[in-house]
Image (cartoon, rainbow, N blue to C red):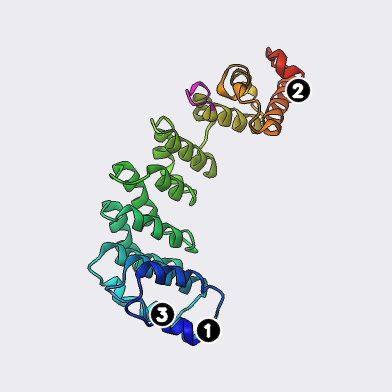
């Protein structure tokens, strides 16, 4: 209504307040409100306001925002340009994909702006290979100030086969959150987690990775990871966390034991787990 239009047209309102207000407008479907939101697409718009406005316009499927996004595309601020290009991509328009790729690969995009961008990127009906290649380049450069695991998760969500070699290298990353994200990303790519790659994780120092690898092998009807699971249950921190997720632990142990029995693996099962099957 009029009150909303007044807020959207108030040049003195704080950007953070305006961003929050925009976040509350999804589903309103008011032509005048959408027109006012399109009016916020200026080259000098604060990045947080632009992100909120573009997210709203995308959610409403506002085709009229496509030509309206031209000023931000020519903005001097890299985050503004990148968000505008990502919005077009999310709307199915790939005309700015090359420029967006260059921006991502350069590492010049502030991390907070990358976080805003990835929300829209995930809504694109198709992500061009050159944009995914840019994410690969960004990960390889390990830009300062970035949470690398978030970039890996972003890339992993697209199940990009060409990223598999990089993701395999990251399985040994010193940061467990990065290696975990790489493992999960590889699991999304058909054929990327070969038995050899998976078995190599059974000797990882990280218990979660060992158990995850064993579970992946078990699902492929391969019992070679069962010993690792039994070892974690018996001697690892998992065994010392009885109160944590008991149902999940029992299910894991039970699945492992059933698979071992089916395969005649002859594993020595800890006595305290035999009673819990």
Mark 2, other Cα within 10 Å: few <14 / some 14–19 / many ≥20: few
Q: Is residue 194 left or right of residue 229?
A: left
Image height of 207 relative to 89, above or below: above
* Tag 3–tag 1 contact (CB < 8 Å): no
Give the x, y percent position of residue 102: 28, 57
Residue pictured at 49% horizontal, 29% vertical: 197
- Tag 1 secondary structure: loop
Which of pointers 3 and 2 indicates the residue nearer the eye? 3
Image height of 228 relative to 35, above or below: above
Q: Which residue is mark 2?
A: 276
Q: Which residue is mark 3?
A: 8
Mark 3, other Cα within 10 Å: few <14 / some 14–19 / many ≥20: some
Q: Quadrant of residue 77?
A: bottom left
Residue pictured at 60% horizontal, 33% vertical: 216
Residue 176: in sight, yes or no? yes
The image's mark for residue 30 is: 1
Give the x, y percent position of residue 45: 31, 72
Give the x, y percent position of residue 252: 68, 29
Residue 93: in sight, yes or no? no
Residue extending furthest toward the left: 76
First in sequence: mark 3 vs mark 2: 3
Distance from the alpha carbon under mark 2 to that under mark 1? 59 Å
Front residue of this view, candidates 172 and 145? 145
Q: Quadrant of residue 249?
A: top right
- Residues rendered magenta in the picture: 202-207
Image height of 12 relative to 125, above or below: below
């Amino acid at each position: 209504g009029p009150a909303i239009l007044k807020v959207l047209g108030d040049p003195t309102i704080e950007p953070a307040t305006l961003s929050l207000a925009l976040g509350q407008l999804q589903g309103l479907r008011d032509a005048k409100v959408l027109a006012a939101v399109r009016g916020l697409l200026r080259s000098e718009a604060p990045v947080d306001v632009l992100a909120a406005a573009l997210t709203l316009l995308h959610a409403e499927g506002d085709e009229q925002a496509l030509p309206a996004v031209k000023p931000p595309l020519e903005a001097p601020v890299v985050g503004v340009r990148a968000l505008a290009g990502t919005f077009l991509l999310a709307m199915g328009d790939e005309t700015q994909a090359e420029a967006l790729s260059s921006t991502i690969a350069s590492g010049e995009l502030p991390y907070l702006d990358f976080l805003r961008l990835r929300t829209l990127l995930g809504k694109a009906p198709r992500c061009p290979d050159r944009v995914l290649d840019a994410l690969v380049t960004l990960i390889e450069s390990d830009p300062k100030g970035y949470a690398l695991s978030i970039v890996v998760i972003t890339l992993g969500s697209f199940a990009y086969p060409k990223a598999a070699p990089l993701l395999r290298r990251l399985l040994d990353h010193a940061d467990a959150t990065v290696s975990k994200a790489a493992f999960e990303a590889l699991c999304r790519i058909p054929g990327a987690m070969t038995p050899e790659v998976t078995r190599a994780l059974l000797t990882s120092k990280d218990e979660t990775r060992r158990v995850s690898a064993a579970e992946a092998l078990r699902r492929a009807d391969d019992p070679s990871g069962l010993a690792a699971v039994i070892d974690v249950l018996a001697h690892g921190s998992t065994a010392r966390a009885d109160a944590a997720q008991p149902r999940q632990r029992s299910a894991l142990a039970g699945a492992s034991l059933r698979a071992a029995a089916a395969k005649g693996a002859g594993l020595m099962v800890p006595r305290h787990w035999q009673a819990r099957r």
